[in-house]
Image (spheres, rainbow, N blue to C red):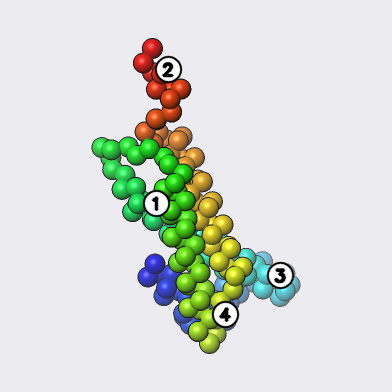
Amino acid sequence: MLVIFGGSGEALAAHRTSRILGPIIRWLFPSLAQDKVDLLILLIRKCAHAVEFGVLAVLFWLALVKPSRHNKPEWRWSDARRALVLTALYAALDEFRQSFVPSRQGAVQDVCIDVAGAVIALLLLSLLGRWRGWWRNTSPDRAAAGSE
């Protein structure tokens, strides 16, 4: 949350990150028109929003569930929902804070991007955990099949 808070200030405003990303994009794609460079910078910035809030959602989930090596948790969508709500609240608070920074603006669409990143991260966590066997299996069908 501190990393997001720090990035929401003046230091990572669009005009500052464009000075870094613009030359890199122009070096990678020298014939790209300026409007396309600007669009690519915008896409990179919005993807960064989604990724950072996706990480935050997973961290909230970890804090709520407290899994350990010796205690496999059961995957519950209610835990994921609580992590998502906490992430969405922080995203809204972050955008509200940005409305007070002169070079930034708070935007509802950024909250939506942040929440979408959190949803994707939690879905990936669920799928990865099922695939890797991180969750305790409490399905009645599987429990009955295992006792036969």
Q: CA distance from mark 4 to mark 1?
A: 29 Å
Residue in the foreground of this view, choosing between 101 and 128: 101
Q: CA distance from mark 2 to mark 4?
A: 55 Å
The residue at the point 45 percent across, 35 percent down is 130
Which numbered circle lies on residue 61? 1
Q: Amino acid at mark 3?
A: Lys
Q: Is residue 34 left or right of residue 147?
A: right
User: Label 4 belongs to which residue?
Assistant: 105
Q: CA distance from mark 2 to mark 3?
A: 56 Å
Say whether disc 3 or disc 4 marks the residue closer to the N-terminus. 3
- Residue 48 horizontal/vertical position (percent): 53, 64
Total marks placed: 4
Dot 4, crowdedness within 10 Å: few (<14), some or many (≥20)?
A: some
Q: Which residue in the rendered view is the most extreme toward the left?
A: 70
Q: CA distance from mark 1 to mark 3?
A: 37 Å
Dot 3, crowdedness within 10 Å: few (<14), some or many (≥20)?
A: few
Q: CA distance from mark 2 to mark 1?
A: 30 Å
User: Label 3 belongs to which residue?
Assistant: 36
